[in-house]
Image (spheres, rainbow, N blue to C red):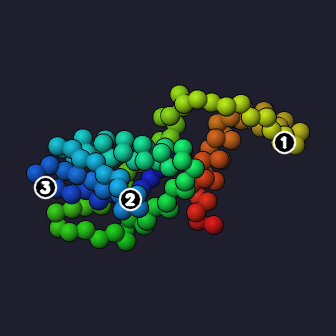
C-alpha cells in the first residue's frame, strides 16, 4: 500500500523536512535527494509505529492548502508499506461465497495480498468516517 503525505522542505545550512499532518515526524539531509530519501524513511517508520500501536493514520492535508515561507517548499512524499513484507505473518481463516472464490481464482488474484491491501486501506481511511 502506498502512503502519500505532504511535507514542508526547509533550506537552511542544510535541508530539513517536516510533515504537517504527522506530529513530530521530521528528518534532514545535506541535499534534496538525501532529504527526500530520509523523509520517505521517516514517513514509513512513523506509519508503522502508529499501525503497531493500533492508532489511526491521519488523513493527509491537501498539498495546495499548505503555506510556507520563501525559503521553503511543499512536496508530496510517498512510501510503500509493502517494504515491510518481512514482518511476522499470522494465518487467518475466512469464509467467502463460492462464486467469489471461483471468480478470483480464475483471475489469479492473490488472496493474501488483496486482504492486506483492503485492511490497510480500511485502517487508513477509518478516521474519515
- Alpha carbons under labels 3 and 1: distance apart: 55 Å
**On the rendered structure, is 20 left or right of 104?**
left
Residue at the front extreme, as displayed: 53
- Say which label, 1 or 2, has the lower sequence index: 2
**Left or right, 69 with reference to 45:** left
Please state which of residues 37 and 127 is positioned toward the viewer in this rendering.
Answer: 127
Mark 1 or mark 3, which is nearer the start of the sequence?
3
Is residue 75 visible in the rendered image? The answer is: no
Residue for point 27% across, 53% down: 17
- Spatial separation of the CA atoms under disc 1 and disc 2: 40 Å
Residue at 21%, 57% in the rendered image: 10
Label 2 belongs to which residue? 23
* Camera sees residue 68: yes
In this rendering, the label closer to the viewer, 3 or 2 = 2
User: Residue 79 location in percent, x, y?
Assistant: 43, 44
Q: Which mark is residue 76?
A: none
Under tag 2, what secondary structure?
loop
Q: Is residue 10 left or right of residue 113?
A: left
Instruction: Determine the residue positioned at 29% across, 71% down.
Output: 67
Taking 6 as reference, is 42 above or below it? above
Q: CA distance from mark 3 to mark 2?
A: 21 Å
According to the image, label 3 marks what residue? Answer: 12
Mark 1 or 2: in front is 2
- Residue 80 percent across, percent down from the top left: 47, 41
Q: Quadrant of the C terminus?
A: bottom right
How many numbered marks appear?
A: 3
Q: Is residue 121 above or below residue 100?
A: below
What residue would you read off at disc 1?
96
- Judging from the image, what secondary structure is the residue with disc 3 in? loop
Residue 112 coordinates in the image, percent (x, y)? 68, 34
Left or right, 23 with respect to 71, comes to right
Q: Position of residue 40 (x, y in %)?
A: 36, 44
Amino acid at each position: 500500500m502506498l502512503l502519500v503525505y505532504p511535507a514542508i522542505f526547509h533550506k537552511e545550512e542544510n535541508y530539513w523536512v517536516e510533515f504537517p499532518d504527522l506530529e513530530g515526524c521530521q528528518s534532514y539531509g545535506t541535499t534534496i535527494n538525501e532529504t527526500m530519501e530520509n523523509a520517505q524513511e521517516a514517513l514509513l517508520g512513523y506509519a508503522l509505529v502508529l499501525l503497531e500501536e493500533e492508532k489511526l493514520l491521519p488523513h493527509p492535508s491537501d498539498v495546495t492548502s499548505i503555506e510556507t515561507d520563501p525559503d521553503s517548499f511543499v512536496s508530496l512524499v510517498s512510501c510503500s508499506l509493502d517494504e515491510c513484507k518481512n514482518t511476522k505473518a499470522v494465518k487467518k481463516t475466512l469464509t467467502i461465497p463460492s462464486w467469489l472464490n471461483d471468480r478470483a481464482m480464475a483471475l489469479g488474484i492473490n488472496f493474501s495480498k488483496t486482504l492486506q491491501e483492503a485492511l490497510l486501506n480500511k485502517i487508513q481511511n477509518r478516521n474519515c468516517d
